[in-house]
Image (cartoon, rainbow, N blue to C red):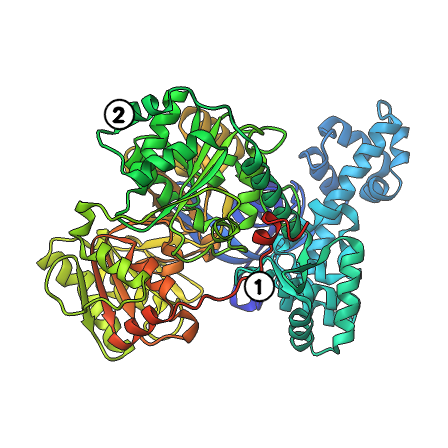
């Protein structure tokens, strides 16, 4: 970073107001000459008394006044007896207060810090310091100096400070040595660098192109990258070729890397359905666990339910309906087994059947939990059943591990859910890891009802759990096919089923709830979509913009979600002198914007909704310091965690924080974390899974062949509850209906369930 472009201030740390041990974010008081100023930034391991030179800029926080936001820091330990005394007396080392600090400095003078770091046993010369206390003082000081040196080492090589905090938490004093020996450790997502940034760092350390560490990191990168394409494992021949091309090495170097990963247990080689495949160890264990647990549930019998017909009649009475034949079959399967699948398209009565199963389980004395993969899906399940539903992440108590990559869950085999049954909605969205975590937390004798639409897109994450379970024929599957009378009146429902059968609906607009507007190119698609959401639908049909969701097949490309968002934002929420805004990367966020979270953030704090003014005050308080956070959390309903796919609105903004409302939760969002957000006036069809909207505008410009498929179109159409308007080319629409090819996902779950693979 070019320090000449930034303001520079220099002083001594007076006090640490707040420090997040996970990412090193710090709020501190800095003595600069005769003044005391507040500074904020990523400064892990900082202690009072340290000298700081900060590069950054001044801004004004709405609640805490003027602050200096540090982009970069140079740290130094105090020199001279007086400065060292102030450093120690200020609490820099736990267990050393002002009195003991004076004794230590009086004995060792300017050598004090050198003695503490390298010869702490000399501290026993001072009355009251035992051998153990001397060792503890030395250890605590070395931790601080180790963190400082690590930060300096990483900064000299262009690595962000957040990596230092996480590296030190993981490796302690050996962190610098560890990454010097293998800088590709930084490519672990937990440490914040991608493979290419770690590769650049490694080149500065003179690692060769075919270094084993580089090859193995490239293999992992290819494997993790392809998780995004849904693959649980990759064929060895394809993985070898792709990795060799990525880093320009010979295939035999990659083969040696594969063998090394397998030998260490970091990867597992196994032949699945005739394909020689390679799994990363965590995905292999997740897939095996899901197969073993579902297979066991399918084999285990339950006691015959006495008076089942009477119980079903009571459930019917409670729902106020008479169940159709297939719905009764579903209730019987739920009563007589430990696991089942309930699937069906729109209008076929899945929700009514779920309500029936809930009523039946109530009659049987079975405690049932409701869950879904996304917040919107869980909220809709709550509204439709009248029972509380939670996201799977919240149900399981998701959080970040102390170190390393991934998610940890409070609920697991050692602390199971208190339930007799789980009903999982929108199961097609659930990837192999999340399904493994849910099954791990369910009691051995509990039941699982998997509900979803098998014709929708599969999960964004690895695996095709719902489809594999259905295709295995190991689990009872009840497929609802009859469209109920009320649903038959909807063109959305009728056309969705036609699309699913490969029949292109009539696209002439004759009223109703399904319309198609022909537009020849991406520019006209964008213009029409923008006009519809900002003007035509609100004025002509009484549908406000907040009830409309624009969907697109892709995020990129002309007419994709990114381009649509910019156009819609300009129409609905243009720049204004009375609206604050912040540009992060290539996106300008403005008060009033609709935004979406793009990754799981387990640490960010939210408070429950009341009045906006009180919310903002409380949000500021819980974000300010650990003490205030704990106090406010006790006094008010508050918590942590915003998850991938959550949608909210920017309610306010000050100089360093945006206040974003996600339904009833208000989140103070530091600007430096807004890279996790994107505008959400338009989202991809994949991101819309599990959601239902009053009105959907579907943009269909020409797009890559991989996105021109039936399941994507079917998923988009079935997101609309009252109104669907498709805008684009009739040829694109017809091509999507005609193409029923689905990208193959390398998954072994079906084979494992069928006993073909152990």
Please determine whether, in this image, residue 448 is positioned above or below residue 712.
Answer: above
Mark 1, Cα crowd under 10 Å, few <14 / some 14-19 / many 20+, is: some
Q: Is residue 345 left or right of residue 602?
A: left
The local secondary structure at tag 1 comes to helix
Name the spot of residue 270 as percent of width and height, x first: 70, 58
- Residue 85 in sight here: yes
- The residue that appears at 38% across and 34% down in the rendered structure is 389
The local secondary structure at tag 2 comes to helix
On-image quarter of the N terminus: bottom right
Q: Is residue 622 left or right of residue 481?
A: right
Q: Which mark is residue 552?
A: none
- The residue that appears at 74% across and 26% down in the rendered structure is 99
Q: What separation in Å lies between label 2 and label 1 (alpha carbons)? A: 47 Å
Q: Label 1 belongs to which residue?
A: 226
Asked where in the image residue 533 lies, by quadrant, the reply is bottom left
Please determine whether, in this image, residue 501 is positioned above or below residue 249.
Answer: above
Q: Label 2 belongs to which residue?
A: 318
Q: Is residue 131 left or right of residue 624?
A: right
Please determine whether, in this image, residue 551 is positioned above or below residue 487.
Answer: below
Name the spot of residue 161 as percent of width and height, x first: 62, 55
| Residue toward you, 500 or 390 | 500
- The residue that appears at 73% across and 37% down in the rendered structure is 85
- Residue 609 in sight here: no
Asked where in the image residue 293 lies, by quadrant, the reply is top right
| Residue toward you, 756 or 624 | 756
Name the spot of residue 240 as percent of width and height, x first: 69, 71
| Residue toward you, 223 or 536 | 223
| Residue toward you, 76 or 480 | 480
């Amino acid at each position: 970073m070019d320090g000449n472009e930034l303001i520079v201030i220099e002083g001594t740390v007076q006090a640490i107001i707040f420090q997040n041990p996970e990412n090193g974010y710090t709020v501190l008081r800095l003595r600069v000459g005769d003044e005391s100023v507040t500074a904020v930034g990523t400064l892990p391991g900082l202690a009072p008394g340290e000298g700081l030179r900060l590069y950054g800029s001044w801004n004004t926080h709405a609640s805490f006044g003027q602050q200096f936001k540090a982009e970069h820091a140079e740290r130094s330990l105090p020199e001279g007896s007086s400065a060292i005394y102030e450093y120690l007396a200020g609490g820099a080392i736990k267990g050393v207060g002002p009195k003991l600090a004076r004794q230590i400095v009086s004995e060792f003078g300017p050598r004090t810090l050198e003695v503490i770091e390298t010869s702490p046993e000399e501290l026993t010369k001072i009355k009251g310091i035992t051998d153990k206390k001397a060792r503890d003082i030395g250890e605590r000081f070395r931790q601080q100096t180790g963190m400082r040196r690590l930060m300096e080492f990483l900064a000299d090589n262009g690595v962000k400070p957040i990596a230092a905090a996480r590296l030190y938490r993981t490796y302690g004093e050996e962190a610098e040595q560890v990454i010097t020996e293998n800088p590709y450790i930084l490519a672990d997502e937990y440490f914040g660098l991608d493979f290419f940034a770690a590769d650049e760092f490694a080149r500065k350390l003179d690692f060769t192109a075919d270094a084993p560490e580089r090859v193995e990191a490239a293999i992992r990168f290819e494997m993790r990258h392809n998780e995004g394409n849904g693959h649980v494992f990759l064929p060895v021949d394809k993985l070898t070729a792709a990795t060799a091309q990525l880093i320009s090495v010979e295939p035999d170097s990659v083969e040696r890397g594969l063998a090394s990963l397998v030998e260490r247990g970091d990867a597992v080689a196994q032949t699945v359905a005739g394909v020689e495949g390679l799994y990363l160890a965590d995905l292999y264990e997740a897939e095996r666990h899901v197969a073993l647990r579902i297979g066991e549930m399918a084999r285990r019998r339950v006691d015959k339910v006495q008076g089942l017909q009477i119980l079903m009649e009571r459930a019917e009475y409670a729902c106020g309906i008479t169940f159709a034949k297939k719905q009764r079959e579903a209730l019987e399967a739920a009563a007589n087994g430990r696991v089942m699948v309930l699937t069906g398209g729109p209008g076929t009565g899945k929700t009514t059947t779920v309500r029936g199963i809930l009523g039946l389980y109530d009659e049987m004395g079975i405690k049932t939990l409701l869950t879904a993969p996304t917040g919107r899906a869980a909220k809709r399940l709550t509204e439709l059943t009248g029972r509380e539903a939670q996201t799977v992440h919240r149900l399981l108590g998701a959080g970040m591990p102390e170190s390393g990559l991934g998610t940890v869950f409070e609920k697991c085999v050692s602390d199971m859910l208190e339930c007799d049954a789980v009903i999982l909605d929108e199961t097609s969205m659930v990837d192999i890891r999340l399904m493994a975590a849910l099954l791990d937390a369910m009691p051995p004798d509990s039941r699982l009802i998997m509900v979803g639409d098998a014709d929708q897109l599969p999960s964004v994450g690895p695996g095709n759990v719902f489809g594999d379970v259905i295709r295995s024929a190991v689990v009872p599957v009840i497929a609802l096919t009859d469209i109920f009378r009320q649903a038959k009146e909807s063109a959305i429902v009728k056309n969705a089923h036609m699309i699913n059968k490969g029949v292109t609906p009539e696209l002439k607009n004759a009223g109703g709830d399904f319309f198609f507007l022909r537009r020849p190119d991406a520019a006209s698609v964008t213009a029409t979509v923008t006009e519809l959401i900002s003007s035509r639908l609100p004025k002509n049909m009484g549908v406000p913009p907040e009830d409309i969701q624009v969907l697109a097949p892709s995020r990129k490309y002309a007419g994709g979600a990114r381009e649509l968002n910019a156009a819609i934002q300009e129409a609905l929420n243009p720049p204004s002198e009375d609206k604050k805004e912040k540009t992060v990367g290539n996106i300008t966020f403005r008060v009033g914007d609709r935004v979406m979270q793009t990754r799981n953030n387990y640490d960010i704090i939210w408070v429950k909704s009341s009045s906006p003014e009180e919310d903002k005050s409380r949000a500021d308080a819980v974000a300010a310091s650990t003490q205030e956070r704990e106090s406010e959390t006790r006094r008010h309903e508050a918590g942590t965690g915003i998850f991938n796919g959550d949608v909210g609105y920017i309610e306010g903004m000050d100089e360093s924080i945006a206040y974003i409302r996600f339904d009833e939760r208000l989140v103070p969002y530091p600007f430096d974390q807004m890279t996790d957000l994107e505008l959400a006036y338009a989202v991809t069809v994949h991101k819309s899974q599990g959601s239902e909207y009053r009105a959907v505008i579907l943009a269909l410009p020409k797009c890559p062949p991989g996105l021109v498929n039936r399941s994507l179109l079917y998923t988009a159409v079935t997101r609309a509850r009252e109104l669907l308007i498709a805008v684009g080319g009739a040829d694109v629409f017809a091509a999507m209906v005609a193409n029923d090819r689905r990208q193959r996902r390398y998954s072994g779950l079906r084979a494992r369930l069928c006993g073909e693979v152990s």
